[in-house]
Image (cartoon, grey):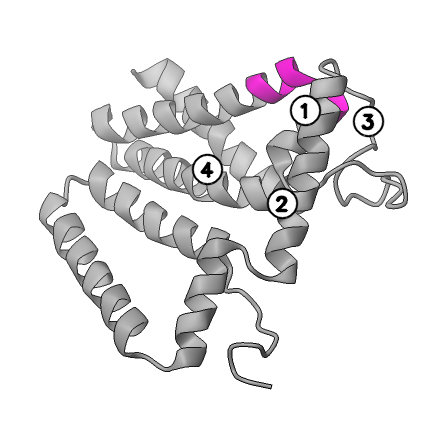
Amino acid sequence: MSSREAPREAASRASMFSAILTLVFGLYLSKNYKIILSSLFIVTAGFVYVYFFSSDDLRYLIQDTITFQNTSSLGHLIEWIEGLISIYENPFGVGLAMSGNASGVDQSIKIGGENQFLIYGVQMGVISMVIYFLILIKSIYNSSKLYLNSNNINHKSVGFITALTKFGLLIPLFTANAELYLFVAFFSWYLVGQSERLYNTKL
């Protein structure tokens, strides 16, 4: 069996893109625009070099990661399609414990589960899904404003960390039931609460 036909795992797109975008967003907030441009040039040059001059196995890994040509990626797509169909057929939701990977969900009858937004949509409907997304965007926006406009170094630190934490979780939320991990959920929303408190009282 040739190397092209051999089974391969795809690199985690969510973690790679999230790490890169979070770094760029952090540099943007701190106004390090030259570093952003330099980093983008280095990453682009490195990608071109790896893609055109690396071994066939690494090239195929990159191709399969980008084009979803592996079992893991197809699993994500199937889960997303199931979730979208359910939301289309039941725009007000089908009830709690019907989607995701939580222990209270019967895996034999669950619908979707590889996208935190679709999980909310399947269970509680389109309105809840949109509200959840808007809360995330608002928390990132307010935290960024707190960092940019506050003169207190401690407040700026809270705003910066909160903005990057919630921004960094955006992409993983599209590919996993990320809020299932209680430490990630509780700590990140605790940061949002602290940031909102400071934003509303100090700005």
Q: CA distance from mark 3 to mark 2?
A: 22 Å
Kind of element beneath mark 1: helix
Q: Which residue is mark 2?
A: 77
| Residue situated in front as seen by the camera: 163 or 159 | 163
Can residue 180 be seen here? no
Q: Residues within 10 Å of mark 1 (few under 14, many from 20)?
A: many
Dot 4 or dot 3: first in sequence order is: 3
Can residue 35 be seen here? yes
- Frontmost of labels 2 and 4 is 2
**Image location (x, y in percent) of residue 163:** 38, 35
Is 70 inside the magenta-drawn segment? no
Q: CA distance from mark 3 to mark 1?
A: 10 Å
- Frontmost of labels 3 and 1 is 1
Q: What amino acid type should be assigned to the residue bearing mark 1?
A: Gly
The residues colored magenta run: 121-130
Q: Quadrant of residue 7?
A: bottom right
